[in-house]
Image: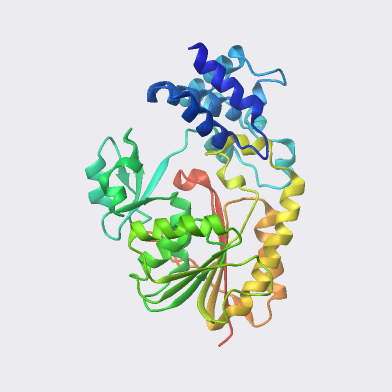
Amino acid sequence: MDLIIKIATRVVTEASETKPADALLRALLKESRLPRADSAEVAELVFAYFRWRGWLGAEVAAAPQFEKAMDLDQRFQRDPISFSDEELKRAVPEWTMDHVDVSGGWLRSLQARPSLWIRAKRGQGELLAKHFGEGSIADATVPDAVQFRGETDLFRTPEFHAGEFEIQDIASQIVGLLCAPKPGETWWDACAGEGGKMLHLSELMENKGLIWASDRADWRLKRLKQRAGRAKVFNYRAALWDGSTRLPTKTKFDGILVDAPCSGVGTWQRNPHARWTTTANDVRELGELQKQLLTNAAAAVKPGGKLIYSVCTLTRSETDAVADFCSQALRGFAPLALPALPNERPASSARRWIWPQQFFGNGMFVAAWEAAK
């Protein structure tokens, strides 16, 4: 137990904006070679500490603080309503109140244990849920999204190595469905990262047509190539793009997804350490970057094509404010109604908020425009 506390203490004291707690945790656990059960206990202590840090004071992390965090965590799991909405505001930094529509439902979602979501191959969601068992369920609204509730190391399963599923949050899966690409179209995933949403676009396009995937970091595109090979996705081209007016291709696209860098407020349930490193200034700066990326990418949309904006954040500066700016600044574009998800009433809005308490996943914002024909 002493080693478990020692490693957890080192993570929470050394973690910073440049050394995220989750990355530091992985590195220290790999170095320690603890048994899997002990490693899980370290992770539980670390995430409980950051989840309940607003209740712990500013003292140096030590065993009593971990004990208090775990007590609060277990009380919440037993009875979430025992915490008032006002009390739960301690779960987020003060600046959040000025930038996010804070509600009791959202705050409670932040303090809950995060769900692990996987995306099965098209039409295989229910079969995959039954295969893994252990309480895993297929979501009724998001086709082939499976909430995994087991203890199996998914990365070691034959199904993962055969490309039968991807580990992808349900909110990110919703983004792909809202893009609604068609087989044979040409799309650009402008901020593709390691390729999670690009792989989903390809699945929806039945691996037909063409997808350009770009990012400013070459190492992410190399990781994307590995993932695409395992998933047997071949209808894509990868290219570096720094977000400037110099686009990676002269191609005109049926659809462009700009899944822009953001403050990540929508991931605070899964990544509680980020609550305490993100600042209001980050939010303002990223809002300006998002406007720039959308403005530059819009030049590559063909007449009648779609421009989709998504961010895993919930701040007004990075959501409605960016969408308002683009609706005024992008000449020749008009807001485009996003499609409804299966089992939903038809939607008519060009903007969609995805709150964590709705789907038990990350928070996201999506907006869409159509270029004049």
Residue located farthest toward the bottom when viewing the structure as drawn: 373
Q: At which x and y percent is residue 334?
A: 61, 77
Coloring scheme used: rainbow
Judge from the rendering whether residue 142 lies leftward or rightward of residue 223; answer left or right: left
Q: At which x and y percent is residue 320?
A: 66, 60
Q: Is residue 345 visible?
A: no
Instruction: Report which quarter residue 164 is drawn in.
Output: bottom left
Q: Residue at x 65, y 19 (%)?
A: 61
Q: Is residue 115 visible?
A: yes
Q: Residue at x 25, y 39 (%)?
A: 133
Q: Nearer the viewer, residue 297 or 229?
A: 229
Up-down: is 76 above or below 146?
above
Instruction: Report which quarter residue 280 is drawn in.
Output: top right
Quarter of the C terminus within the rendering: bottom right
Q: At which x and y percent is residue 12?
A: 62, 26
Q: Nearer the viewer, residue 58 or 28?
A: 28
